[in-house]
Image: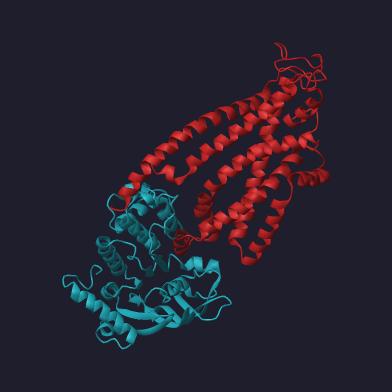
């Protein structure tokens, strides 16, 4: 398996301040592999994702190495120029964020928003572009793609918004999808559907996935391997099944035990589908 | 679904109120401003008298022959008022265009460039905002001579500082939004990011101040003309007409009252239009269509 993403000794600092927010994080992601990143709020998982996307803004600063295997050769994200990153984003790596309402432009119709990456990365114009927009919406199982394409983001429901955001992330056919808590802002009934969509989209396209969540059961259902983060550090990493059945670190054990306890209280709740 | 339904229901009555108010503002503002614009355009093609025609007798009151009377040189005041409308429109448009272009460009550079440039530009803007328009106008006049162009340039530059700061703040806020981050992750470059997401989201914030500056520019030009820094004779602007009528105000009050009234009408018209435009540009109002 060739590595699509190699993160090596990644640290994120606040410029000029002392303690790192992400400290010496390393992991590798192969083609088609699905990695779960788990940790409580403030554990540095989102910062890690932003660093991989090259989106850390001043005063945050990354050090270490993040290599993405792009079509035109490897790209080192840390310290890369904006212009270089623009060629990787979208085509090699796409992202879905937590809050779908915030991650779409309120003043732009959904169809127009979706058209831009299709134009830029796949060179589509005119009728072909229009069809591709509708296809992209249909691909994320949105009924009435025509209506959705004409709508503004506040005119569709929360679950539909997240599906649009996923369509946007997938539009340029990236080889790696970074999903940063994509279901946290959705209500429970909608979550399962969105999770299923991410899972099937990744499987159908043979994409790699980095799935970030604080939700152990959700990650367990979707990831091959899991990285557990706490206070900016990786405290444990391994195969999902192994890690969950025999957690070595105290923190992971607490997480697993908490999930179990909750599960025991609600015997009907599935471990992998919806959220407990 | 459960999320949008109540939201849409809440929005509707509010939006209806907005639209009701919008139409009144737009209609009144549009009529006032439209009349001035129409007069200004008409002055390009037809004037009752030549501006330099002094055959009308001095300081005549309004009559059938001279609708607004004549000034102390015997020139037709209605003709001058029409030309004044044209100059006012030119001043407003020109200085607002300068303020918008310079302000938006500087503001966007400050918002997107690195910290040093941003800090430097922001300090310069603070100085520029504190700088009196009249003083700036005197500098421009000293550099280029007294003319309408100088006045427009000075007023436009003075206004651009406020627009630049507003653009910088609003653009920074837009750039910090999640959807900009999301758009970046699909490979959108900085220039396209500005065109697709930043400008459309900044624009609604700028419409009202720009429209207000239109009115402000007309007043500023009147003040500059009043102190002799505006457009030179014989193309009298409303400000110059006020100044010329000052000494004879007790004999021929209409020469002072009429340009003043037109100034007031223009500014009220523009401000009402600005209010109406803001409601139209407001994304919340758009959702209901």
Residue A30 vs residue B37, the one in the foreground? B37
For the question of whether residue B289 can be seen, the reply is: no
Picture quadrant where residue B70 is located: top right
Image x and y of residue B266, in percent: 63, 31
Residue shown at 76%/37% (left/top)?
B224
Residue B206 drawn above or below residue A206:
above
Foreground pick, A6 / B246: B246
The cyan one among the chains is A
Tell me the red chain.
Answer: B
How many marks are shown on the rendered structure?
A: 0
Q: Quadrant of residue A136?
A: bottom left
User: Residue B83: horizontal and vertical position, in percent?
Assistant: 71, 26
Which of the pair B72/A107 is nearer the observer? B72
Quadrant of the image for the N terminus of chain A? bottom left
Q: Residue furthest front?
A: B250
Query: Residue drawn at (64%, 54%), measured in percent from left and top?
Result: B106
Furthest toward the left, the residue is A268
Counting from the top left corner in percent of width and height, residue B282 is at 47, 44
Task: From the viewer's perspective, tell me whether residue A204 is left or right of residue B32.
Answer: left
Question: Residue lying furthest top in this view?
Answer: B64
Residue at x-position 39% and y-position 49%: A152
Q: Residue furthest bottom?
A: A248
| Residue B130 relative to residue A58: left or right | right
Relative to B236, A61 lies left or right: left
Location of residue A98 in the rendering, given as x and y in whole percent from the top left corner? 38, 64
* B109 or B177: nearer the viewer: B177
Q: Is residue A138 something one can see in this rendering?
A: yes
**Rendered-image quadrant of the C terminus of chain A:** bottom left
């Amino acid at each position: 398996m060739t590595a699509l993403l190699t993160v090596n000794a990644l640290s994120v600092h606040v410029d000029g301040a002392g303690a790192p927010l992400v400290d010496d994080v390393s992991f590798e992601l192969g083609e088609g592999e699905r990695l779960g990143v788990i940790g409580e709020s403030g554990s540095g998982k989102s910062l890690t994702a932003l660093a991989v996307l090259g989106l850390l803004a001043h005063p945050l600063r990354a050090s270490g190495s993040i290599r993405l295997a792009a079509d035109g050769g490897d790209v080192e994200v840390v310290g890369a120029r904006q212009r270089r990153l623009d060629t990787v984003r979208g085509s090699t790596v796409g992202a879905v964020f937590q809050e779908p309402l915030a991650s779409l432009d309120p003043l732009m119709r959904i169809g127009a928003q979706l058209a831009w990456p299709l134009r830029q990365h796949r060179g589509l114009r005119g009728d072909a572009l229009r069809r591709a927009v509708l296809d992209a919406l249909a691909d994320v199982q949105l009924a009435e793609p025509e209506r959705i394409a004409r709508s503004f983001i506040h005119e569709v429901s929360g679950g539909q918004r997240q599906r649009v955001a996923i369509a946007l992330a997938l539009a340029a056919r990236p080889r790696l999808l970074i999903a940063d808590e994509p279901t946290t802002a959705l209500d429970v009934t909608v979550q399962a559907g969105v999770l299923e969509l991410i899972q099937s989209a990744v499987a159908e396209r043979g994409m790699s996935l980095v799935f970030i969540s604080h939700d152990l059961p959700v990650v367990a259902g979707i990831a091959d391997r899991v990285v557990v983060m706490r206070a900016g550090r990786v405290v444990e990493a391994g195969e999902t099944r192994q890690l969950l059945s025999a957690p070595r670190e105290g923190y992971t054990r607490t997480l697993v035990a908490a999930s179990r306890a909750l599960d025991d209280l609600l015997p009907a709740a599935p471990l992998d589908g919806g959220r407990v | 679904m459960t999320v949008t339904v109540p939201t849409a229901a809440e929005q509707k009555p509010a939006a209806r109120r907005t639209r009701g108010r919008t139409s009144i503002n737009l209609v009144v503002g549009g009529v006032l401003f439209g009349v001035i614009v129409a007069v200004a355009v008409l002055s390009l093609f037809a004037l009752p008298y030549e501006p330099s025609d002094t055959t009308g007798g001095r300081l005549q009151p309004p009559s059938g022959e001279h609708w607004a009377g004549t000034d102390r040189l015997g020139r037709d005041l209605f003709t001058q008022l029409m030309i004044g409308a044209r100059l006012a429109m030119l001043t407003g448009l020109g200085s607002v265009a300068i303020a918008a272009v310079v302000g938006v460009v500087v503001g966007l550079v400050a918002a997107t460039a690195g910290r040093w440039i941003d800090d430097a530009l922001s300090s310069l803007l603070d100085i520029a905002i504190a700088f009196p328009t009249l003083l700036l106008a005197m500098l421009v006049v000293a550099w280029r001579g007294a003319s309408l162009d100088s006045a427009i340039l000075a007023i436009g530059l003075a206004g651009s500082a406020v627009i630049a700061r507003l653009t910088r703040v609003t653009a920074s806020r837009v750039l910090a939004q999640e959807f900009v981050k999301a758009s970046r992750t699909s490979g959108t470059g900085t220039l396209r990011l500005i065109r697709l997401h930043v400008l459309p989201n900044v624009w609604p914030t700028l419409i009202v101040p720009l429209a207000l500056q239109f009115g402000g520019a007309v007043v500023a030009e009147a003040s500059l003309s009043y102190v002799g820094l505006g457009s030179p004779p014989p193309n009298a602007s409303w400000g110059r007409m006020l100044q010329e009528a000052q000494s004879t105000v007790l004999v021929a009050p209409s020469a002072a009252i009429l340009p003043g009234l037109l100034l007031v009408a223009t500014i009220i018209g523009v401000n009402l239009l600005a209010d109406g435009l803001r409601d139209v540009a407001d994304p919340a109002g758009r959702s209901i269509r």
